[in-house]
Amino acid sequence: SQKIEQNSEALNIQEGKTATLTCNYTNYSPAYLQWYRQDPGRGPVFLLLIRENEKEKRKERLKVTFDTTLKQSLFHITASQPADSATYLCALPPSGYNKLIFGAGTRLAVHP
Amino acid sequence: GAVVSQHPSWVICKSGTSVKIECRSLDFQATTMFWYRQFPKQSLMLMATSNEGSKATYEQGVEKDKFLINHASLTLSTLTVTSAHPEDSSFYICSSDRGLDTDTQYFGPGTRLTVL
């Protein structure tokens, strides 16, 4: 069956450290994968998109990798800040569709 | 950036009543909008794809007669939860891909529905 898996346990890290979140998928062959941030009671906000022919993408303190062999994407936040505390969702398009399927998200808590 | 709004932001209703949720694109024309539902601590579940001027496409397991979708203009899609029951209580979120930039979704702020 098709699955998108993110670590359901919250990730607690110290301010200034690098946070690494994982997204694994099964039985999909996505042309791209996206990462979103969601704050409590709010809609998701787009962060980064990485395509299947890209290994790595960066945006300010954010970095995403995409390994189509492992069927995995890693999302890194360097020099993390308490303001980075949120739930981070990965999403991908089922083959041939322009819609998105989301993982359950990983909650990140950055402590001062 | 693209902005999507939703109204109301929250609603409480009695069981058996119908509730309409509006999703508007404020600075672009949205030929396609997506409706999601999110239960606490769970993922966004795609309910349906709303297409301007045509019928919505519903995901498997979503009752089209219970969740009525109307996309009558390029800036407005509505989701009506008919004969709502407590199990319909959830966070409903819409999104659009702007059409030109089809890979990125712009989400509304969500509507919290509570059915008593």
Image (spheres, grey):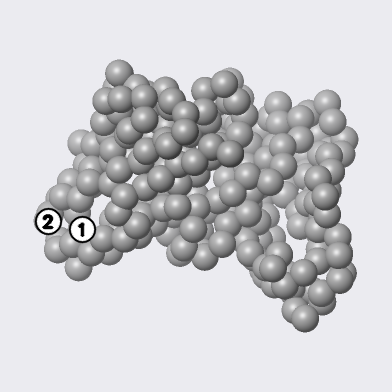
Say which chain tag 1 marks: B
Quarter of the picture containing the N terminus of chain B is top right
Q: Position of residue B113 (x, y in %)?
A: 30, 59
Measured from the top left, where is residue A8 in percent x and y? 64, 63
- Per the image, label 1 sits on a secondary structure element best described as loop
Q: Quadrant of residue A66?
A: top right
Cβ–Cβ under 8 Å for marks 1 and 2? yes
Question: To which residue does mark 1 refer?
Answer: B85
Q: In this view of the protein, can residue B58 be seen by the observer?
A: no
Q: Is residue A76 above or below residue A80?
A: above
Q: Residue at x 75, y 79 (%)?
A: A111
Q: Residue B83: x and y, percent?
A: 15, 50
| Crowdedness near tag 2: few (<14), some (14–19) or many (≥20) residues, C-alpha within 10 Å | some
Instruction: Farthest residue to the bottom: give it.
Output: A112
Please name the residue that numbered disc 2 is placed on: B16
Q: Amino acid at mark 1?
A: His
Q: Is residue B108 above or below residue A83?
A: above
In which quadrant of the rendered image does the C terminus of chain B lie? Answer: bottom left
- State the residue at coordinates (45%, 52%): B109
What is the quadrant of residue A82 in the picture? Answer: bottom right
Mark 1 surroundings within 10 Å by alpha-carbon count, few (fewer than 14), some (14 through 19), many (20 or more): some
